[in-house]
């Protein structure tokens, strides 16, 4: 009798936890399937390569895709070098006990926990209002508003800050897998510290740097909150031509189409398709990052 | 302790002490190392041989919490002097590690690494250097047709000789070798030993080894370390035939260690 | 074993006598670097410490760049709080009246029933009367009020409904996500066969990679109607839908950190238990799980912080009506969603703008404290995993 109860209880525990685990898998599949099914018929070359038409009830999403690509590109150009250099500082220059390094590590951790919307506020308060106004004053006596407005540059820089911790952590992890032997070999040959970093450490961390970049891009591509008021535009069929232009953006477009469009039901196909495109892009980015990371990790094991 | 005269001394070590944190790893070492000879360092594991070797090119400075006092003079220049540039110092001293550690680059780039960081970029010049040093390290014939191949594709013994070539390419005067053959099979080991014998014509070599036969075969002088102290040093012949200290004899005859 | 007589010149030097010297270094000027007066051999001159500009600049530059993260966090603090600060030094000035019709432009409202519409009309009347004295200003008492009507003739900046709204959605999402995620983590750490792990881990990674706007979209377009049809409640978008959607975003975090904590439990503990004859599930439940409690707790805290700050999901799935109620089936407006929805329309520097920054400052502080608390419970490594690596 007692044994039976134990057995039943045991199966219950295993069954329940297994059910929890597989409900997650099921949800992932359902969400993906819904979006794929809902969006696949609308997706066409035309959809991907033309701007929206007729008050965004028809046409494609080209400006949104380009906007996202540009944003992510500028973000990477600004953010990845800073992340790599910070990681180099933390792992190669800072002593284990260094206070500065501890402070920087703390900052990176904190930065990683700040809500995306707060980054948006910061972008508005700092880049748009402070730096932008400053630039306008310097460049044109502050008479006309040029930089002190939400734009592509400010949105990208805000995003660069948001993704900075991702880059730092993944590059640092990769740098740590570079064997100490190689550093010693280089230093023993009379290479300086910087030469060793440049010729040995960084080339051997390339995969990690790439992973960090991709992870940052995928994280950045999926975040909408920080650009809500730092540069994203509701409707702007023209592609952005300069850093001071506003821009359409894929994630933002999903949000706008689903909540503010004039006729939500008529555009449901477009909404699904836009979401599908966004999901596909982030999925591919994540997949390549996971693949690269597993390669870095397996080197760590050896 | 040693019989070498000052003018015949390449490296003069006096009262060298080294602490890792609070742990003393070397105590009062004094030793003279003769130029263009092979000096073998022997002793049981953990007695401080590697640590001692690393004090000669100041590689210990890469380790946190190391404290060193005493004097190390090379050609009568105090290398622990504040005025001495450690990078310049290391350019003049080659180091070979226990585990061969070629860079994950081509054979050519491995050897050319030192010259390149010293500002030689002329391809012709580099090719000359690579060829001469690979020949000197007795590996040229084995690799001359695939210099572009990854160094990691070589066998362990070849990798080790490549590392020696890499060290030679910066034209050092001293070679420090930390158990260079311990990970190799007998044939590869024999090749390394042969090479060492060749190299001592031109270089002052200090080699750590666990292998008594090897010490006897390749070295001119042998120093026996025990628990961070230099117990005895003499010509290898004397050390292996008539050591003065009992500990040395015990170790050499394999009674401990 | 004789000492070799000192050789006057080694062959390296002899090489240099060749007509076309394959010179390796030094005297011929090549390897030792052009023009730095390098001399081979161990001479005081040759070994003299030299100043290397490139080395110096590299180190300084790297240190300066490394400061950016530190500067960023300080600046975020400064700029968010700076914009929020005027609230507390509000001058006695009249707010310019805003067009009444622009009030509460929330698409959530379309789903509000007539009853509620009427109620909010009444509320508005009442509030007009009671705050006649402090119109349009965000005094501290106004901030502590129960009405959030920033865009009306008589703006009300009571953040209480927003705070409660945030807590409602967050709590709900944690209540849904924690059991699922922790059980799933326990399953992975203790019971799952290899193949199950190989399905589960990528699924979690994919879920973690979903942009929040995609989850929000799914909740808004699919989940909301589905649940309303299923349970037949009044408002299509409400705290429950938002919380459920949010749970999707939080599950990967809780799962990852909890799973790490569970697998980090030393083997000997579970092995000892198994050796004593306890079954696998007993060991998991009574040995492994309790041993990993700090990590699991931290996982929940981190999930809480993430949910509290998340914007797009709540913006899309909760209905966004700022009503103060504890009913989980009514629409709700969170702090983050309020910032997200209203910031783009405000006038820079006015009271509304300032109050939104104040909300941001509260979010920042709160998530900061949560993260700090979580850090107390887990090792750095786990934290890294949560941070997307
Ligand atoms: N980086 C370090 N930090 C602290 N202690 C160290 C460090 N390296 C070596 N030691 C200690 O110093 C002592 C000497 O070590 P060393 O590596 O020089 O010995 P060894 O003679 O080379 O031994 P083996 O023959 O095993 O290589 C040992 O007790 C070791 O534990
Ligand atoms: Mg050793």
Image: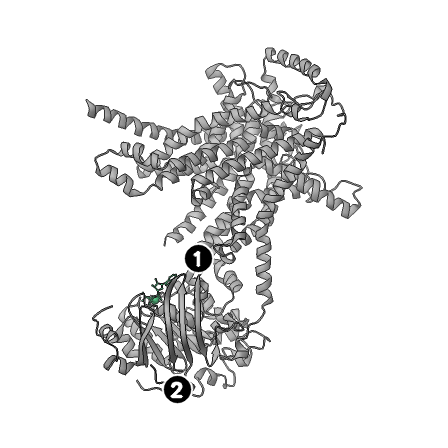
Asked whether, in this view, residue C264 is left or right of residue C76, the answer is left
Chain letter of disc 1 in the image: A
Q: Where on the picture, by quarter, is residue B26? A: bottom left
- Up/down of C131 relative to A243, above or below: above
Give the structural element (helix, strand or loop) at label 1. loop
Q: Residue at x 53, y 42 (%)?
A: A110
Q: Where on the picture, by quarter, is residue B241? A: bottom left
The N terminus of chain C - image quarter: bottom left
Which is more toward the observer, A119 or C273?
C273
Chain letter of disc 2 in the image: B
Which is more toward the observer, A15 or C284?
C284
Q: Which residue is mark 2?
A: B5
Locate residue A195, reporting x and y percent: 52, 64
- Up/down of C218 relative to A239, above or below: above
Colour scheme in use: one colour
Proximity of marks 2 and 1: CB atoms separated by less than 8 Å = no
Give the structural element (helix, strand or loop) at label 2. loop
- Please tell me in which quarter of the rendered image ligand 2 is found: bottom left
Give me the C-alpha separation between circle 2 and circle 1: 44 Å
Asked whether, in this view, residue C299 is left or right of residue A15, the answer is right
Locate residue B102, reporting x and y percent: 41, 65
Locate residue B46, reporting x and y percent: 32, 65
Q: Which residue is mark 1?
A: A178
């Amino acid at each position: 009798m007692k044994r039976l109860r134990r057995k039943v209880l045991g199966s219950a525990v295993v069954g329940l936890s297994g059910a929890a685990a597989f409900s997650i898998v099921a949800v992932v599949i359902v969400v993906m399937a819904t979006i794929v099914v809902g969006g696949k018929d609308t997706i066409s070359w035309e959809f991907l390569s033309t701007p929206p038409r007729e008050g965004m009830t028809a046409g494609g999403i080209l400006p949104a895709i380009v906007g996202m690509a540009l944003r992510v590109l500028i973000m990477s150009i600004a953010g990845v070098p800073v992340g790599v250099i910070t990681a180099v500082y933390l792992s190669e220059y800072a002593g284990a006990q260094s206070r500065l390094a501890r402070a920087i590590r703390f900052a990176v951790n904190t930065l990683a926990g700040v809500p995306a919307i707060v980054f948006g506020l910061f972008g508005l308060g700092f880049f748009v209002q402070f730096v932008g106004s400053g630039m306008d004053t310097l460049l044109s006596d502050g008479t006309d508003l040029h930089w002190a407005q939400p734009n592509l540059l400010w949105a990208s820089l805000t995003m660069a800050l948001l993704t900075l911790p991702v880059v730092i952590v993944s590059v640092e992890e990769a740098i740590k897998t570079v064997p100490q032997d190689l550093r010693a070999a280089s230093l023993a040959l009379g290479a300086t510290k910087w030469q060793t970093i440049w010729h040995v450490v960084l080339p051997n961390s390339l995969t990690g740097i790439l992973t960090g970049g991709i992870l940052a891009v995928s994280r950045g591509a999926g975040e909408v909150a920080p650009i809500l008021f730092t540069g994203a535009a509701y409707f702007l069929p023209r592609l952005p031509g300069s850093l001071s232009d506003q821009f359409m953006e894929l994630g933002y477009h999903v949000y706008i189409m689903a909540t503010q469009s004039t006729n939500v039901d008529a555009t449901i196909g477009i909404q699904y398709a836009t979401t599908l495109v966004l999901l596909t892009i982030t999925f591919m980015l994540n997949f390549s990052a996971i693949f690269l990371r597993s390669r870095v990790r397996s080197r760590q094991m050896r | 302790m040693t019989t070498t005269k000052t003018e015949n001394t390449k490296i003069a070590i006096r009262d060298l002490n080294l602490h890792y944190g609070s742990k003393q790893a070397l105590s009062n070492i004094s030793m003279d190392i003769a130029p263009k000879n092979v000096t073998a360092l022997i002793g049981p594991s953990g007695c401080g041989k590697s640590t001692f070797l690393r004090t000669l090119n100041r590689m210990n400075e890469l380790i946190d919490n190391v404290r060193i006092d005493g004097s190390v003079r090379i050609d009568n220049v105090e290398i622990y002097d504040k005025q001495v540039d450690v990078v310049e110092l290391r350019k003049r001293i080659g180091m070979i590690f226990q585990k061969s550690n070629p860079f994950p680059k081509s054979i050519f780039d491995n050897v050319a690494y030192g010259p390149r960081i010293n500002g030689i970029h002329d391809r012709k010049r580099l090719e000359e250097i690579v060829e001469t040093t690979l020949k000197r390290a007795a590996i040229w014939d084995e690799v001359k047709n695939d210099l572009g191949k990854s160094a990691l594709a070589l066998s362990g013994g070849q990798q080790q000789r490549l590392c020696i070539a890499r060290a030679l390419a910066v034209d050092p005067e001293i070679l420090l070798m930390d158990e260079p053959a311990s990970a190799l099979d007998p044939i590869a080991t024999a090749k390394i030993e042969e090479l060492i014998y060749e190299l001592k014509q031109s270089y002052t070599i200090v080699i750590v080894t666990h292998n008594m036969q090897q010490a006897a075969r390749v070295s001119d002088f042998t120093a026996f370390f025990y628990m961070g102290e230099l117990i005895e040093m003499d010509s290898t012949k004397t050390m292996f035939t008539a050591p003065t200290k009992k500990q040395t004899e015990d170790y050499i005859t394999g009674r401990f260690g | 074993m004789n000492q070799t007589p000192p050789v006057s010149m080694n062959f390296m030097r002899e090489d240099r006598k060749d007509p076309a010297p394959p010179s390796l270094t030094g005297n011929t000027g090549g390897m030792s670097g052009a023009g730095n007066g390098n001399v081979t051999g161990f001479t005081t001159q040759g070994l003299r410490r030299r100043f290397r500009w490139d080395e110096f600049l590299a180190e300084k530059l790297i240190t300066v760049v490394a400061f950016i993260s530190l500067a960023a966090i300080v600046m975020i603090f400064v700029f968010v709080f700076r914009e929020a600060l005027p609230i507390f030094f509000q001058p006695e000035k009249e707010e310019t009246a805003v067009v009444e019709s622009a009030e509460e432009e929330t698409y959530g409202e379309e789903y509000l029933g007539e009853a509620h519409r009427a109620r909010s009309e009444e509320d508005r009347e009442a509030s007009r009367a009671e705050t006649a004295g402090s119109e349009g200003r965000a005094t501290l008492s106004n901030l502590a009020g129960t009405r959030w009507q920033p865009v009306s003739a008589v703006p009300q900046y009571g953040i209480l409904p927003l705070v409660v709204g945030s807590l409602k959605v967050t709590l709900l999402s944690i209540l849904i996500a924690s059991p699922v995620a922790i059980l799933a983590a326990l399953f992975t750490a203790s019971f799952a066969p290899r193949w199950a792990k190989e399905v589960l881990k990528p699924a979690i990674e994919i879920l973690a990679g979903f942009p929040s706007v995609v989850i929000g979209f799914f909740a808004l377009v699919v989940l909301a109607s589905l649940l309303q049809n299923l349970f037949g409640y009044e408002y299509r978008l409400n705290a429950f839908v938002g919380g459920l959607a949010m749970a999707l975003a939080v599950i990967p975090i809780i799962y990852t950190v909890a799973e790490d904590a569970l697998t980090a439990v030393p083997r000997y503990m579970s092995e000892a238990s198994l050796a004593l004859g306890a079954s696998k599930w007993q060991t998991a439940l009574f040995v492994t799980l309790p041993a990993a409690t700090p990590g699991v707790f931290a996982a929940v805290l981190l999930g809480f912080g993430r949910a509290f700050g998340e914007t797009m999901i709540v913006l899309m799935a909760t209905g966004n009506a700022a009503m103060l109620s504890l009913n989980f089936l009514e629409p709700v407006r969170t702090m983050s969603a309020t910032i997200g929805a209203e910031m783009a329309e405000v006038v820079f520097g006015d009271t509304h703008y300032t109050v939104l920054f104040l909300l941001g400052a509260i979010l920042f502080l709160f998530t900061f404290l949560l993260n700090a608390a979580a850090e107390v419970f887990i090792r750095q490594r786990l934290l890294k995993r949560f941070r997307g690596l």
